């Protein structure tokens, strides 16, 4: 069940949009209710200032209202006071591009807001206040419209809740990196693309967000991999809700996070480890074979998650591809097994076999296929039985080659080869390779 806060109950007493009710309550604390009522009145109708009135009007406005301000409302308030002082005369208003009818309509709304505020016990007496007081009131009323300039070269902005927009060209707060906007409108451009225009902006300070919304301002560690630099970057991000306010670079990045990101890039194939070579893959294939065929040896298999952990260990202490590119891989991979377990691996899934005739051919391992050896036929003399590994459970496939290293036969039954096949092919091989011994 939702509970209404004490401030919420006070806001309900105002027959106004919640934004303005909250702004007026804040204005009571800052002693600027009179000005806040005028701000509220100025936002209720049509735009007070006409757009695209020409350079002469723009120059006249700057002379009277100033070229820069802490809030676009300051310009509107000065324009309205100027129009009111001149009895909203059309000719006078036209000189400054003020919409006289709109300006005249603001007066009754202003009086109405002052009456409402007074009825609710607020101090509506006009008094001199600092700009900061009214700026904070506007921020409190429009905190869901806090915006940040994305760069100094354009007017592109990012707002809370992941929204984007463009600050209005006529805004007087274009030099402020952080502000709050009271008006957001969608405008269709020439190419029918809809643009989000942010107007009625008021400059704010990041410290005000900490002061007024302490629970919504958080410092978070952000770590990412920069593909262009091939390097992990880290920054302490200051956020208001989901809007990034500032970033402070952290160098070096946290070791664990950097290792995880580098490992992710390696596993995705975007970074290559030259030393993660055929020898490493052979070692893994040997281990996988024993884990599958000889579970009773209780060797720990290396799955995808385990492989990720090994690569993270390999990357630990590194922040860039340069740091890991030439690192030795095999010792780190082999450390997955204890010394005793490595001895079992070497015994039951050896890198080389010792045949009865003294030959020691290299065993080739491939995941999902039988291990195999490749030998010329003369190197297999006196080897009458198919060699086996993995506690004698896995026969080794034999690739039998000619003296010229061309394949003759692939078999897992050497006894049958010598008995049935060899007598048939021996005469032809002897004619083709007369300088070699043929038994």
Image (spheres, rainbow, N blue to C red):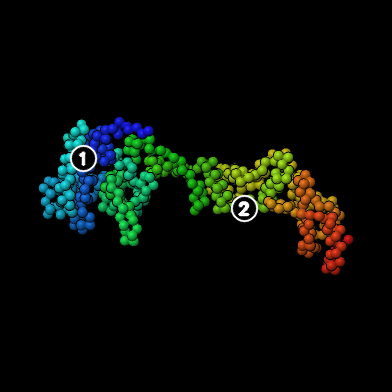
Q: Determine which quarter of the picture holds residue 42.
A: top left
The Cα–Cα distance between marks 1 and 2, rounded to whole angstroms, is: 70 Å
Horizontal side of residue 219 vs 60, given as left or right:
right
Question: How many other residues sit within 10 Å of disc 2, few (<14), some (14-19) or many (≥20)?
Answer: few
Comparing 366 with 322, the one in front is 366
- Residue lying farthest to the right in this orientation: 439
Q: Residue at image x 28%, y 49%?
A: 199
Q: Position of residue 215 (x, y in %)?
A: 38, 35
Whether residue 140 is visible: yes
- For label 2, the SS is loop
Horizontal side of residue 265 vs 247, given as left or right:
right
- For label 1, the SS is helix
Q: Residue at image x 79%, y 59%?
A: 400
Task: Check disc 1 and report the residue beneath it.
Answer: 37
Q: Earlier in the sequence, mark 1 or mark 2?
A: 1
Q: Residue at image x 70%, y 45%?
A: 292
Whether residue 136 is visible: no
Q: Position of residue 112 (x, y in %)?
A: 17, 40
Q: Determine which quarter of the picture holds residue 343.
A: top right
Task: Check disc 2 and report the residue beneath it.
Answer: 274
Q: Position of residue 139 (x, y in %)?
A: 29, 40
Comparing 319 with 120, the one in front is 120
Image quarter (top left, top right, bottom left or bottom right) of the N terminus = top left
């Amino acid at each position: 069940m939702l509970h209404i806060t004490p401030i919420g109950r006070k806001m309900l007493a105002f027959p106004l949009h919640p934004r303005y009710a909250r702004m007026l309550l804040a204005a009571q604390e800052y002693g600027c209710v009179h000005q806040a009522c005028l701000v509220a009145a100025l936002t209720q109708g049509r735009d007070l200032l006409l757009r695209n009135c020409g350079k002469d009007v723009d120059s006249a406005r700057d002379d009277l209202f100033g070229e820069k301000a802490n809030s676009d409302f300051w310009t509107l308030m000065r324009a309205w006071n100027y129009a009111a002082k001149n009895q909203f005369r059309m000719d006078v208003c036209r000189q400054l591009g003020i919409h006289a009818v709109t300006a005249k309509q603001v007066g009754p709304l202003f009086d109405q807001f002052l009456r409402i505020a007074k009825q609710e016990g607020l101090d509506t007496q006009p008094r001199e206040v600092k700009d900061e007081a009214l700026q904070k009131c506007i921020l409190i009323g429009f905190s869901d419209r806090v915006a940040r300039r994305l760069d100094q070269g354009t007017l592109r902005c990012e707002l809370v809740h992941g929204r984007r927009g463009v600050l209005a060209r006529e805004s007087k707060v274009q030099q402020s990196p952080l502000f709050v906007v009271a008006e957001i409108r969608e405008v269709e451009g020439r190419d029918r693309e809809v643009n989000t225009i942010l107007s009625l902006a008021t400059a704010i300070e990041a410290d005000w967000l900490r002061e007024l919304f302490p629970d919504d301002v958080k410092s978070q560690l952000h770590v990412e991999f920069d593909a262009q630099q091939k390097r992990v970057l880290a920054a302490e991000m200051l956020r208001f809700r989901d809007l990034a306010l500032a970033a402070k670079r952290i160098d070096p990045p946290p070791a664990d996070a950097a290792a995880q990101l580098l490992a992710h890039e390696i596993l995705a194939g975007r970074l290559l480890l030259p030393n993660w070579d055929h020898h490493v893959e052979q070692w893994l294939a040997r281990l996988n074979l024993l884990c599958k065929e000889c579970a009773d040896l209780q060797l720990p298999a290396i799955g995808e998650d385990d492989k990720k952990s090994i690569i993270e260990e390999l990357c630990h202490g590194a922040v860039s591809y340069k740091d890991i590119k030439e690192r030795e891989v095999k010792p780190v991979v082999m450390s997955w097994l204890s010394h005793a377990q490595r001895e079992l691996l070497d015994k039951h899934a050896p890198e080389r076999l010792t045949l009865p005739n003294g030959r020691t051919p290299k065993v080739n391992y491939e995941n999902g296929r039988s291990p195999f050896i490749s030998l010329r036929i003369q190197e297999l003399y006196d080897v009458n039985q198919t060699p086996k590994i993995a506690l004698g459970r896995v026969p080794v496939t034999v690739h039998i080659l000619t003296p010229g290293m061309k394949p003759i036969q692939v078999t897992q039954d050497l006894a049958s080869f010598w008995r049935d096949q060899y007598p048939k092919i021996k005469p032809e091989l002897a004619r083709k390779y007369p300088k070699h011994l043929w038994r």
